[in-house]
Amino acid sequence: MKKNILLVSLLTSATLFSQVGINIDTPKATLDVVGYATDISKLDGIIAPRITGNQLRLKTYTTSQNGAIVYVTAADSSPAGQTINVKSIGYYFFDSITMTWLKLAVQESTYQLFEAFFKEATAPVDTPAGTSDNTNLGLSITATVPANSTVKVILNYSVPMGTYPIGATTSGTNPNANVGGYFGIRFLKNGTEVQSGSRKNIVPFGSAGTNMNTVGANYVEEITNSTSSPIVVTYTLNGYVEGTLTATRFNMWDSSGTNYNWGKGTISVTTFVKRN
């Protein structure tokens, strides 16, 4: 008799705990929660564990935690490793394929702001007369395309440049008395020129002194990453001169002073992301 009672108890326990219900006697799923829809004094909802991005970065999740959900209350200040994508507040789930935290999309078909970068030149850069397309201006930005996502990139740049009278003669002759050729920007993506983003202008000819211009462009593209790992894209601005008869100065006329005389060279990149 005791054995039969024990068997019935075990079977009953297994049945009771196979599904869990809150405010419901007969749960219809593993966890079935019924709120208080008509009671305005009770606030319905389920709150996931709340944690900052920095705190989450200190934890190491495995495939056993695939699908885990947390609510990030503050972005990771140094995104890396499993929190490489934790760059804003919101709900995140752990993906065991990429071994990273991925943000739950609000609407799969809508782009959301992902990253924004801005960089400005720190000093003038000079290039001698002649032809050259690889003058390092120190203007480069790297963006990330998360796994299984499409990113829209919006890039803008503006770089002042002009002829630079180096080595005026003792007789007072301006070495820029005769100038010609082209100067501009060679636009690179991961080290390869993208001609739609490059620009060049004619250097004014036959004008003594410094001849200055500002070269700028807007560049937009979409990048789809169908892999399970993030990819990075680096955009770089190189100074370009062709057939010039005098030196060219890029970025600014002077590294100090009001507006640096010509202004400053800048590049900005803003990215928007959506899940594939």
Image (tube, rainbow, N blue to C red):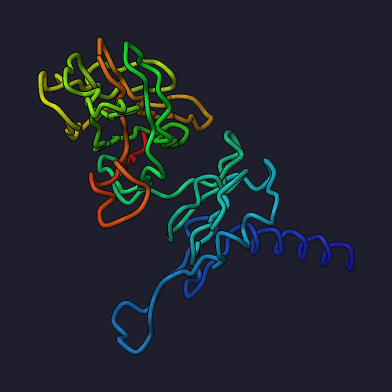
Residue 223 located left or right of residue 97: left
Most foreground residue, 71 or 6: 71
- Tally of numbered tags: 0
The quadrant in which residue 207 appears is top left
| Residue drawn at 31 percent across, 28 percent down | 170
Q: Residue at x 55, y 64 (%)?
A: 52
Quadrant (top left, top right, bottom left, bottom right) of the C terminus: top left
Placement of 78 over or under 262, stated as above or below: below
Q: Position of residue 210 (x, y in %)?
A: 20, 32
Residue 164 seen in the figure: yes
Say above or below: 138 vs 177. Answer: below
Query: Which residue extends farthest bottom?
Result: 41
| Quarter the N terminus occupies | bottom right
| x 43%, y 22%: residue | 190
Q: Would you place residue 189 above or below residue 41 in this image?
A: above
Between 158 and 53, the one lying in front of the other is 158
Taking 260 as reference, is 225 left or right? right
For residue 272, say whether it is visible.
no
Q: Residue 90 location in percent, x, y?
A: 43, 59
Q: Nearer the viewer, residue 240 or 255?
A: 255
Residue at the image point whose x is 54% and y is 68% from the top = 50
Q: Residue furthest right?
A: 2
Residue 102 location, x and y as percent?
49, 45
Q: Position of residue 219 (x, y in %)?
A: 23, 30
* Depicted 260 relative to depicted 135: above or below: below
